[in-house]
Image: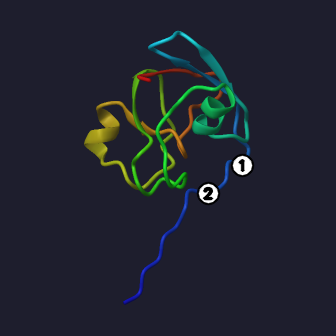
Amino acid sequence: LHFERFAAPPVVAGEPFTATVASTGNAVSVAADETLLAALQRAGIAAPYSCQQGFCGTCRTRVLNGVVQHRDTLLTTPERDSGMMLTCVSRAPAGEQLIVDL
């Protein structure tokens, strides 16, 4: 039995963006080199997670508004089209504002 897992590549040449938590209205600035999950944690916002590598799907979150740069291999095209993202690896383009269903 041979088994390999590959994590999302580190954020290189990323651009900062903003994410707003729909339930509270809190806006969180996400640095060019950090994940949305890390920014949420830094801001004290509880968000589900487990592997932090884009494998498990625990951090799957609905995006209510905004464009997502998917950096995972877990979500299916229908899931992506319906507005889902993995906060532990995916990001938004420069200057984009995401509104996440947390």
Q: Callout 2, which amino acid?
A: Pro
Q: Could you tell me if the residues under marks 1 and 2 are in contact, i.e. CB atoms within 8 Å?
A: yes
Vertical position of residue 95 compared to residue 82: above or below: above
Q: Callout 1, which amino acid?
A: Val
Tell me the element at label 1. Answer: loop
Residue at 72% over, 49% down:
12
Q: Nearer the viewer, residue 44 or 93?
A: 44
Q: Nearer the viewer, residue 86 or 70?
A: 86
The residue at which mark 1 appears reads as: 12
Place of residue 43 in the rendered image (x, y in percent of width and height, measured from the top left): 67, 25
Q: Could you tell me how far apart the alpha carbons at marks 1 and 2 are, in whole angstroms?
A: 8 Å
Residue at 42% over, 80% down:
3
Q: Is residue 3 left or right of residue 18?
A: left
Q: Nearer the viewer, residue 50 or 91?
A: 50
Place of residue 25 in the rendered image (x, y in percent of width and height, measured from the top left): 53, 9
- The disc placed on residue 48 is none
The residue at which mark 2 appears reads as: 9
Place of residue 11 in the rendered image (x, y in percent of width and height, measured from the top left): 68, 48
Vertical position of residue 23 compared to residue 54: above or below: above
Identity of the residue furthest to the bottom in this view? 1
